[in-house]
Every structure is written in structure tokens, then in C-alpha cells.
Image: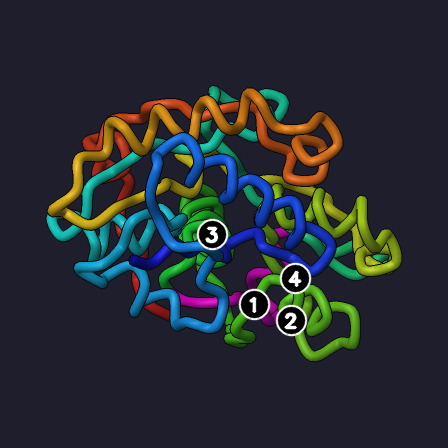
Amino acid sequence: MITFLGMYDMPHAASAYDRLWHAIRTELGHGPDALSRDIDPWEAWQSDDLLLAQTCGLPFRARLYGQVNLVGTPDYGLRDCPQGYYYSYIVRRRGDSRSLRDLARGGTIAFNDPLSQSGWAAPVALLADKGLRPAATMQTGAHLASANAVLDGRADYAAIDAISYMMWDRAEPQVFAGLEAFMRTKPTPGLPLITAQSRDPKPIAQAVTRSIHTMDAADRDILLLKGLVQIPEAIYRAIPIPPMP
């Protein structure tokens, strides 16, 4: 069986994620001894042997819907967001006073992946609402790489998942010291937990919920977790799929 919680599994949070998985496994009464970390996310998400994984909303609605079962959506307690929702910060280099319109027209946006809700779909939707589109793009492969591309001048702005931003900013404040989060995108449903289509998601959701609520307070603070909520699949599917870069 495969368990993959790699979306926010940063080095400083790895031990807390290990303890969370151990608690979930204890509640379930079965499952692998350890989280799968050396695995391609798509291999995990599409495996018939998947017990539990966290994915992104865009892969879920664009490619995984109908192939997996939705377990629930972790809630990180973001302010000004419905439970289980999140947004992206639009960042630029500190001292750069260009507006979003100026950046879109004359700058380069760094993005992690074209199938990222937070890194690509959310900023494209924000720009489209203003009648804009990115003039130039740079794919980086990761949010942290996008931040570094803006810092060193290879790109001019980027959209960083708010949970990633907050976790990095707590653990390594210097990462974003040279950046300014000057805008944020519209909230959308957060990164869902999924299981293989052959599995019943209800007992898994119950095990995750109980495990989050019984976590050590320090671990819950590291992972920013507040609970698990049920957001209907239809709400994920109603969000438009953005054009590719």
C-alpha cells in the first residue's frame, strides 16, 4: 500500500508528518509502516494500491476525477477563507513597485507546474479577471524554486501557495526576506486527500479527523492543521481548467 503526503512535507515538518501518519495508521488498524517519499506523485496518485495521498485541486479535477475517491480536504485555518480553502500570495522582489498590471505586461511569471492550482491556475485566473495574461513565463518545478527565480532576477513575480509560504516563513524566515507578498488570489478549495477508487473513503476520513484532533499541539502548529472538512467534488470540478502556458 502507498501513503504519500508530500505536498507540504518539508524537511522541518517531516517528523511531524511521520507522527501524523503513525496515528492515522493506528486508527485504521492497517497500512504501511512509513510514508512513501521517494515516489513520483503521479505514480502514487494513480496507483491501484493507494491508501492515502494528498494531491492538488487542479490534478484532481483535470486528470484524477473518476479514478480516485475523495477522502476530504485538510483545513489550515487561513483567515478570510472558508474552511478547507486556501489562496496564493503574489510575490515580487522587495523594492519592486510595479503593479500587477505592469508585471503581467512586461515581466516574467515563475510558476512551479502547469497543473498547479496555486502556482499557475490561481494567478492566471486573477490576471484574467483584470483582462490580463502573462507576457512571459518560466516553469521552475517547485514553489521554492519560483521564489528563488524572483529573488535572483530570472523572473519578476510568482504565485506561492499560502500554506507553503507560511510554513517556510516560520521555519526559514530568510527564504522570503527579499520578497514582498503584495496581493493574493481568490480562495479556492484546498489540496484534497484521496484514496484508490476501490477503497471506501469514509473510514479513512474518520481516521484522519481523529488523528488531527489528537495530535500533539506542537506538531499541529508545525503542520498548521486544524481539521478535515468535506468539500463536494462538484465544487472542485466547477473551477475552470486554465490554459496551458
Q: Position of residue 18 (x, y in %)?
A: 58, 49
Quick one: 66 or 82, which is closer to the camera? 66
Can you say whether 46 is above or below 226 in the image?
below
Rate crowding at label 2 as few (under 14), some (14 to 19) or many (20 or more) other CA atoms within 10 Å. some
Taking 45 as reference, is 131 above or below it? above
* Circle 4 SS class: strand
Camera-near label (3 vs 4) is 3
Kind of residue at disc 4: Tyr
Q: Amino acid at mark 1?
A: Ala
Q: Is 176 displayed left or right of 134 in the figure? A: right
Q: In the picture provided, is 212 more to the left or to the right than 242?
A: right
Label 1 sits on residue: 142
Which contiguous range is marked in magenta?
99-114
Return the mark for residue 157.
Answer: 4
Q: Residue at x 59, y 31 (%)?
A: 225
Q: Nearer the viewer, mark 3 or mark 2?
A: 3
Q: Residues within 10 Å of mark 4 (few under 14, many from 20)?
A: many
- Camera-side residue: 177 or 171? 171
